[in-house]
């Protein structure tokens, strides 16, 4: 597949640390749809919305936002990033994404995940003690729904289905189902065994963070009989494309440090990410996709060389960022970064072939 | 010496689940290589996890299955968290109830003691220690002991060497030099998935299989 570049958002409803103003949920949902529209216009390949059940996000129902985005876009693929499948009903998940697929003419995708937040479990009556089994069983059902209709299926944690008619079906042949993986060896192995595309989240750390994840995934896929090298993999990481290297960091840092403090806890409370540590995490050997267009091009190519990636999804605006700054970065990613990366990757693959 | 059945079900003791071993009988019936008539290694697992099922027993069952492919074994298990008040109320050996006495005796008489524990608050759980506080001071002298532990991250791996091994050094037990550790991320639920850990168990047990075979009396 050609190298794909996209963006994702959690629909953050966070105070902009520069202006002190907090967007209303109404403003944020409109801005989210606008981000999708701009991303589509500048030729990006993927738009993702993450699922979070909290007041500081408007992403509790990502499929609704993706459906709205479908109406304002032409070509971009529309994905969850991620769907917390463990605490959802796979039948309902399928129905919603298949509807988006029909609305958008076959552009819907699902990234299924366990979720790094636990709010949805008590909300929908699930026991966190069943964390692993819930995901395993629900992914099994989702894949079964994708494969056949009507469906007869039996599990342990959800009522059985007997000759169930689950509609609509996909617009085209199928709806891609990726699995979001944070880096635990077991997730990489179970995803590889199923032969599903893997979306690797790289929050903070060295660019090499997922080398073991990918090795375990490919080994598991190969030993289960899948064509391991043909399975798509993506990296999902935070970033910001600025006009200049320093400008990008100066713009991203205040938001990002706030977002991390509100979502990444130690001793039950957020902690500040210092500017030196942020700068280190933005260095060429580290994971954040922040910098000038050329810097982001270089890092995406480094990612591609390291992992043989098929796709990169950049999470921009985490922690609250003015829409204008956010849209400018989307535009730079689409017009100055993506064409160069696609061209270089294609050239590298031709010379390797 | 009396033979302890692998399916003993006195309080706190259960047969070790052996999902990958064909048939329901002891592994000696199905093990591929052992000499006919050779003695079985009587393995007793002291399980320090309160959870059922648990990652600790998930890793331990991989260890037991791998060992059973190398030599004839016969395994049983003591779940310290299931021993009840006859165990938790006892502050000395003479206060334990008969079922607990039997579990302690079984551990003391094993050919191989597998000490398996999760990391709690930086070490093995207090309940696990309480079991060994009731074990006779010299009962484990020169006893083959294999250490197994699980924890929330790789940062806890040295619990094997810095917490568990010194406990058995007190008993003058012969802890074998290999020990096995796995992190939460290596498991899907309680099923061990990381092939690196499987490989480590295989390699480690090969190192000590000869020694363990020489300890078999069953």
Image (tube, helix red, strand yellow):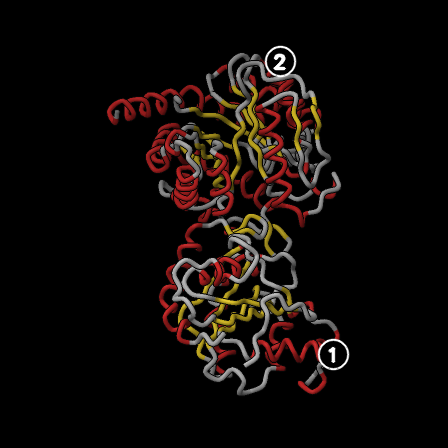
Judging from the image, mark 1 belongs to the subunit labelled B
- Name the one closer to the observer, A194 or A331: A194
- Viewport quadrant of the N terminus of chain A: top left
Q: Give the quadrant of residue A281.
A: top left
Compared to residue B5, the image places residue B52 above or below, namely above
Q: Which mark is residue A96?
A: none
Q: Report which residue position mark 1 lands on.
A: B89
Q: Give coordinates of residue B204: x percent, y percent.
A: 39, 63
The residue depicted at 65 percent of the width and 60 percent of the height is: B51
Instruction: Examine the rendering and report whether any part of residue A262 can be seen.
Output: no
Q: Give coordinates of residue A168: x percent, y percent.
A: 65, 16
Q: Give coordinates of residue A288: x percent, y percent.
A: 44, 39
- Viewport quadrant of the C terminus of chain A: top left
- Name the one closer to the observer, A97 or B133: B133
Judging from the image, mark 2 belongs to the subunit labelled A
Q: Which mark is residue A103?
A: 2
Classify mark 2: helix, strand or loop. helix
Q: Give coordinates of residue B89: x percent, y percent.
A: 74, 79
Instruction: Examine the rendering and report whether any part of residue B66 can be seen.
Output: yes
Classify mark 1: helix, strand or loop. loop
> For the residues marked 2 and 1, what is the alpha-carbon distance in whole angstroms?
66 Å
């Amino acid at each position: 597949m050609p190298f794909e570049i996209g963006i994702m958002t959690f629909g953050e409803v966070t105070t902009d640390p520069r202006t002190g103003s907090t967007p209303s949920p109404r403003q944020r949902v409109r801005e989210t749809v606008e981000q999708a529209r701009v991303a589509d216009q500048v030729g990006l390949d993927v738009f993702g919305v993450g699922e979070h059940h909290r007041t500081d996000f408007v992403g509790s129902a990502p499929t609704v936002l993706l459906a709205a985005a479908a109406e304002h876009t032409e070509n971009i693929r529309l994905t969850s990033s991620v769907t917390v499948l463990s605490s959802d009903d796979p039948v309902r998940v399928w129905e919603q994404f298949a509807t988006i697929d029909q609305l958008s003419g076959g552009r819907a995708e699902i990234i299924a995940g366990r979720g790094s937040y636990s709010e949805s479990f008590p909300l929908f009556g699930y026991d966190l003690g069943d964390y692993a089994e819930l995901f395993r069983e629900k992914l099994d059902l989702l894949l079964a729904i994708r494969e056949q209709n009507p469906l007869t299926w039996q599990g342990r944690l959800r009522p059985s289905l007997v000759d169930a008619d689950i509609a609509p079906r996909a617009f085209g042949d199928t709806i891609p189902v990726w699995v979001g993986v944070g880096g635990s060896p077991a997730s990489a192995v179970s995803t590889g065994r199923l032969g599903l595309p893997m979306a690797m989240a790289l929050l903070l750390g060295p660019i090499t963070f997922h080398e073991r994840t990918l090795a375990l995934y490919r080994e598991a896929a190969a030993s289960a009989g899948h064509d391991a090298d043909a399975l798509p993999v993506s990296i999902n990481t935070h970033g910001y494309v600025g006009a200049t290297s320093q400008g990008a960091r100066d713009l991203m840092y205040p938001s990002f440090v706030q977002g991390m403090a509100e979502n990444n806890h130690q001793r039950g409370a957020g902690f500040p990410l210092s500017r030196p540590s942020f700068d280190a995490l933005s260095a060429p050997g580290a994971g954040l996709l922040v910098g000038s267009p050329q810097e982001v091009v270089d890092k995406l190519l480094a990612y591609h060389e390291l992992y043989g990636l098929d796709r990169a999804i950049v999470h921009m605006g985490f922690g609250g960022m003015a829409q204008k700054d956010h849209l400018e970065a989307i535009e730079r990613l689409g017009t100055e970064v993506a064409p160069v990366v696609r061209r270089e990757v294609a050239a590298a693959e031709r010379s390797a072939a | 010496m009396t033979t302890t059945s692998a399916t003993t079900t006195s309080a706190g003791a259960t047969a070790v689940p052996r999902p990958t071993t064909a048939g329901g009988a002891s592994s000696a019936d199905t093990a591929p290589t052992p000499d006919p008539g050779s003695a079985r290694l009587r393995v007793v697992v002291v399980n320090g996890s309160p959870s059922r099922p648990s990652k600790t027993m998930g890793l331990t069952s991989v260890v037991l299955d791998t060992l059973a492919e190398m030599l004839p074994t016969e395994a049983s298990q003591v779940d310290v968290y299931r021993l009840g008040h006859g165990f938790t109320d006892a502050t000395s050996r003479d206060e334990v109830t008969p079922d607990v006495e039997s579990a302690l005796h079984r551990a003391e008489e094993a050919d191989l003691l597998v000490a398996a524990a999760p990391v709690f608050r930086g070490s093995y759980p207090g309940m696990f220690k309480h079991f060994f506080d009731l074990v006779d001071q010299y009962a484990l002298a020169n006893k083959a002991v294999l250490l197994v532990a699980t924890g929330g991250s790789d940062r806890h791996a040295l619990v094997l060497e810095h917490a568990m091994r010194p406990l058995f050094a007190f008993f003058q037990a012969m802890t074998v030099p290999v020990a096995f550790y796995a992190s939460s991320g290596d498991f899907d639920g309680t099923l061990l998935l990381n092939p690196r850990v499987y490989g480590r168990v295989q390699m480690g047990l090969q190192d000590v299989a000869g020694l363990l075979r020489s300890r078999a009396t069953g």
